[in-house]
Amino acid sequence: MTRIAFIGVGNMGAGMAANQAKAGHEVTAFDLSPVALAKAVEAGCSASNSVASAVAGAEVVITMLPAGKHVREVYGAEVLANAAPGGLLIDCSTIDVDSARAVAEQAKAAGFRFADAPVSGGIMAADAGTLAFMVGCEEADFADVEAALTPMARVVLRAGEAGAGQAAKICNNMLLGVSMLGVCESFALAEKLGLDAERFFDIASKSSGQCWSLTNYCPWPGPVPAAPSNRGYEGGFLTALMLKDLKLSQAAAAKVGASTPMGAQAGALYALFDGLGHGGKDFSAVLQLLRGKLDELS
Ligand code: NAD
């Protein structure tokens, strides 16, 4: 049994904290939202009334917050000043690499072990305890980080030193955004060329066009029954979050001078789709923009 402080029990953090409690750990949760906090209590956590009181006495602190500014504020103002000496601090939010590195440095200077550990997998994976974690931390700390994340994980992979988890996450999601748009464009062209969509899927999925966006998450309804395209593009990975991750990857690319023209195009298309009011749809719904059939989205 480990004493865990869980800060940020929103859409993702709720299921993650619940899985820690289910694994027999003593989880103290804090969230600015009383509604989110009440749900965490229903799931077996105890509630705290501040970050400071949640982290005091915790052996492991896990944060799952919206963006870099929240993570910098929560660590800078509250976690580092109040966490138990020698505690293991793990931030699972998706944030910019610079913020992750800055918080890691501050944590190290204050005598803590810190890992950035963003996740792949959405709310369903968070609830099921099947997230993939990409970890940036010192090699010597990885075994403890992996053990702490295991109740929430399908797999825990070390990407490198501080910030490497965030770097891996934004590179992976840029690849995902670009590959999804490639799959959507191909279906849109196939349709105009008179190809049957199911037939095209059968051929591409057994040919060199095969990729995760096609065979696990097919944007065309039908061929992959579990894909969000079969339930009106509800649930899944929201367009707004894909746009967030593409903005992070473009900002990182600009900073280090990397050439990412496809990532830039993907960002522009998802910004357009989001701006048209579809930020709450799964990101594969962008197919309907490329088909010129936005009216098919409810
Ligand atoms: P969310 O908005 O549902 O949850 C964030 C929670 O943090 C909220 O409940 C909010 O009240 C709380 N919060 C904000 N500031 C706080 C503070 N100072 N102290 C305490 N609590 C505070 O967001 P989410 O969907 O759970 O996403 C969390 C993170 O996970 C984001 O970085 C997101 O990019 C990433 N992520 C989300 C998904 C997804 O499918 N939702 C998938 C992968 C990664």
Image: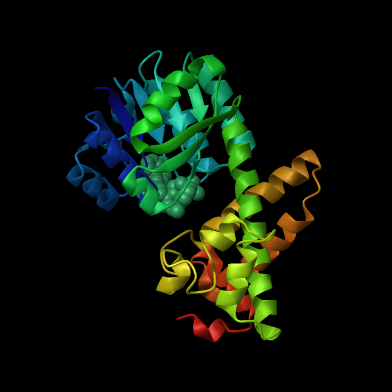
Q: Residue at x 55, y 18 (%)?
A: 139
Task: Specify the quadrant that holds the N terminus.
Answer: top left
Locate residue 275 relative to residue 86 in the image: left or right: right
Would you place residue 284 above or below residue 29 in this image? Answer: below
Task: Specify the quadrant that holds the C terminus.
Answer: bottom left
Q: Residue at x 71, y 84 (%)?
A: 193
* Residue closer to the observer: 142 or 114: 142
* Residue closer to the observer: 243 or 156: 156
Coloration mode:
rainbow
Image coordinates of residue 142 in percent, x first then y, are 49, 21
Would you place residue 218 above or below residue 60 in this image? Answer: below
For residue 13, which quarter of the picture? Answer: top left
For residue 63, which quarter of the picture? Answer: top left
Q: Residue at x 35, y 49 (%)?
A: 10
Image coordinates of residue 178 in percent, x first then y, are 67, 58
Locate residue 184 relative to residue 2 in the image: left or right: right
Image coordinates of residue 56 in percent, x first then y, are 31, 22
Image coordinates of residue 237 in percent, x first then y, are 48, 58
In this orientation, does residue 278 appear?
A: yes
In this orientation, does residue 9 appear?
A: no
Would you place residue 26 above or below residue 16 in this image? Answer: above
Q: How many marks?
A: 0
Q: Residue at x 79, y 56 (%)?
A: 261
Locate residue 205 relative to residue 121 in the image: left or right: right
